[in-house]
Image (tube, rainbow, N blue to C red):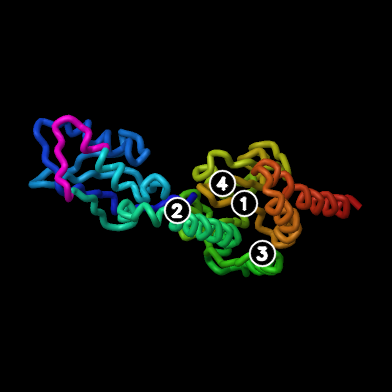
Amino acid sequence: MPDLDLFDKTEVWLEGIQLAGAELTDVAAAAADALSLSRSTVFVADVRDDHVVFDLVVPKVRLEDVIGREPELLAAVGAVPGVTLRPNASIHSHGVLGVLGTPKAQVAEVLAAATGLDANLRAYVSRRVAVVSTGAEVARGEIQDTNFAAVRDQLGAAGYEVHAGGVAPDDRRAIAGLVARLADDGFGLIITTGGVGAEDKDRTIEALESLAPNLATAILATYDVGHGRHVKPHVRVACGTYGETILVALPGPTREVSAALPALLQALAERRFPSATAEAIAEPIRALWRVGHAKHRG
C-alpha cells in the first residue's frame, strides 16, 4: 500500500468544535489514534473560534490510515471530555491529507487504484538508473568518461532506463550529496564508478557508507597500509540501500565496470541481498586482475 508524501502540508483543521476545559494533549492523542499515528507525532497547533488545527509532524502517512477517516477522526475527538462537536463539524486540509474526506463508498475503489499505481510506479523507479562518475580527472575533463556508455549499453539492453548522474570530485560529502539527490529524484539504482581504491583520494566507499549503514563490501585487493600511496588496506566494491534505492560502487576502469555488469544484472534479477550482490560483482573483476597478473608474470 503506498505512502503519501505530505510535502509540508501537514495541518488538519477540525471545524465546528467547542472546547470547555478539554485537555489539548487528549484531543491530539484522540486524533493520532484515529489516524493510526504515534501520539508523539500529532499536536494541537492552534485553537480559535470554532476550530482546532492539528499538525502532523511526519513526512509521510500510509494511505489506508487516512483515506475516508473523517468520521473516525470526528468520533474520536468528540469523545474527549470537554469537547463538543456541532452537527455540521467537518475536517479540512490542504494537500494530500484531503483524502480524509473521501466518501466511504469510494474508499475501496481508490485504494485499489492507488495500489496498482504504486506498484507500477515502484516497478518504473526500480528500473531507472543513474551513473555517477567520480574523480578529479573526470571532473576537470582531463580524461573521457566511458563508464556511462558501458552501463547504458548493457543495462539499457536489459530494459533499464539509464541516465548520466553527473560527476563528483574525490570528496566524501560531494559524492554523498549527489547520490542522495539522485535517490530523491526517483532513481531506483545508482551506480558510482571510481574512488574505491586504497589511496587517500579514494572516498566513494566512505561516501556511500554515510548514506547506507548496511553497505556491504567485497574486497578486490589487500595492501599493507603505508606501503607506497596506500593509506587503506583494501580495494573494494560495494552494494547497499539508501531508502528504496540500490547503491552500487564499481571501480573506475571501464573494462572492470563492463566485466561486473552482467553479474550485477543477474543479482538484481534474483533480488539478492547487498552482501551477495557485492560479492557477485567483485568476482569477475578479480578474474580480470588474476589474468592480468598472470600475463605480467609471464
Decide if residue 296 is on the left or right side of residue 224: right
The disc, 4 or 1, on the residue closer to the chain's N-terminal end is 4
Q: Amino acid at mark 4?
A: Thr
Q: How would you rate the neighbour count of disc 3 (Cα within 10 Å): few for under 14, some for 14-19, many for 20 or more?
A: many
Task: Tell me if I can see residue 136 in this picture.
Answer: no
Q: Amino acid at mark 1?
A: Val
Q: Which residue is mark 4?
A: 241
Q: Which residues are magenta?
A: 76-88
Q: Nearer the viewer, mark 3 or mark 2?
A: 2
Q: Quadrant of residue 9?
A: bottom left
Q: Which residue is mark 2?
A: 108
The disc, 3 or 1, on the residue closer to the chain's N-terminal end is 3
From the top left corner, tell me how far across and down residue 229 is, in percent. Answer: 64, 45
Decide if residue 148 is on the left or right side of residue 109: right
Q: How would you rate the neighbour count of disc 2 (Cα within 10 Å): few for under 14, some for 14-19, many for 20 or more?
A: few
Q: Amino acid at mark 3?
A: Val
Q: Amino acid at mark 2?
A: Ala
Find the distance from the CA under tag 4 to the CA under tag 1. 9 Å
Residue depicted at x 30% and y 58%: 95
Determine the secondary structure under disc 1.
strand
Circles 2, 4 touching at the beta carbon (< 8 Å): no
Residue depicted at x 45% and y 53%: 108
Determine the secondary structure under disc 2.
helix
The disc, 3 or 2, on the residue closer to the chain's N-terminal end is 2
From the top left corner, tell me how far across and down residue 91 is, in percent. Answer: 24, 50
From the top left corner, tell me how far across and down residue 198 is, in percent. Answer: 64, 45
Q: Which residue is mark 3?
A: 151
| Residue 297 disc label | none
